[in-house]
């Protein structure tokens, strides 16, 4: 791209930033959804349910996109009912070995989430 003059340069900058917020939100939303799907697939399901509630796998939730910290983000995790107990099968207890399904999902999905971001943020597509 060659630029001649200040007005043309400002117009090019405006064109680059136009629609950024919409594309950024879509990128975060899509990455969070893909991560949640994989977390749900990686979450173990036990035949025993002492809580009388749904299985942990069914409690995976995705929050809306937030920019409170100045960065676009969407929380992915478990709902308020099952969330407090999710760390027991993930990290282990004295009677249960750790399964590390959260960490496994993070390492598996890193490339996919970055691909989602790039796809949604690419200018001109």
Image (spheres, rainbow, N blue to C red):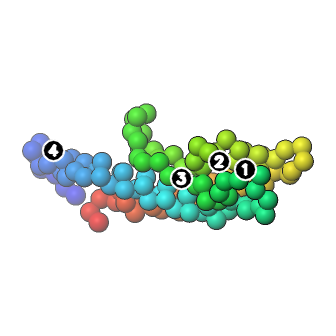
Which one is nearer the viewer's eye here, 44 or 105? 44
Q: Residue at 42% of width from left, 48% of height from top? A: 64
Would residue 41 appear left or right of 120 to someone viewing this image?
Answer: right
Q: CA distance from mark 3 to mark 4?
A: 42 Å
Sequence-wise first label, 1 or 4: 4
Q: Residue at 29% across / 66% down in the picture? A: 125
Q: Which residue is mark 3?
A: 61
State the separation of the CA atoms marked 1 and 2: 9 Å
Question: Residue 75 in the image: x percent, y percent?
Answer: 51, 46
Mark 4 — residue? Answer: 10
- The residue sitting at 60% across, 49% down in the picture is 78
Mark 2 or mark 4: whose residue is earlier in sequence? 4
Q: Are marks 3 and 4 in contact (CB under 8 Å)?
A: no
Task: Tell me, yes or no, whether the two marked residues, 1 and 4, touch with CB atoms within 8 Å.
Answer: no
Front position in the image: 125 or 47: 47
Q: Earlier in the sequence, mark 1 or mark 2?
A: 1
- For label 1, the SS is loop
First in sequence: mark 3 vs mark 2: 3
Residue 1 image-quadrant placement: bottom left
Q: In the picture shown, does residue 72 fall above or below 62?
A: above
Q: How far is mark 3 from mark 2, CA to CA?
A: 11 Å
Marked residue nearer the N-terminal end (3 or 1) = 1
How much space separates mark 2 and mark 4, taking CA atoms? 51 Å
Which of the numbered marks, if any, corresponds to residue 82?
2
């Amino acid at each position: 791209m060659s630029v001649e003059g200040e007005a043309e340069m400002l117009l090019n900058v405006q064109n680059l930033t136009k629609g950024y917020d919409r594309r950024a939100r879509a990128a975060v939303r899509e990455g969070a959804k893909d991560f949640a799907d994989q977390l749900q697939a990686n979450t173990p399901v036990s035949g025993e349910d002492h809580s009388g509630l749904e299985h942990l796998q069914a409690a995976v939730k995705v929050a809306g996109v937030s920019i409170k910290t100045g960065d676009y983000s969407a929380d992915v995790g478990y709902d308020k009912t099952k969330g407090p107990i999710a760390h027991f099968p993930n990290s282990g207890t004295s009677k249960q070995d750790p399964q590390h399904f959260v960490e496994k999902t993070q390492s598996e999905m890193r490339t996919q989430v970055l691909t989602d971001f790039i796809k949604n943020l690419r200018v001109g597509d």
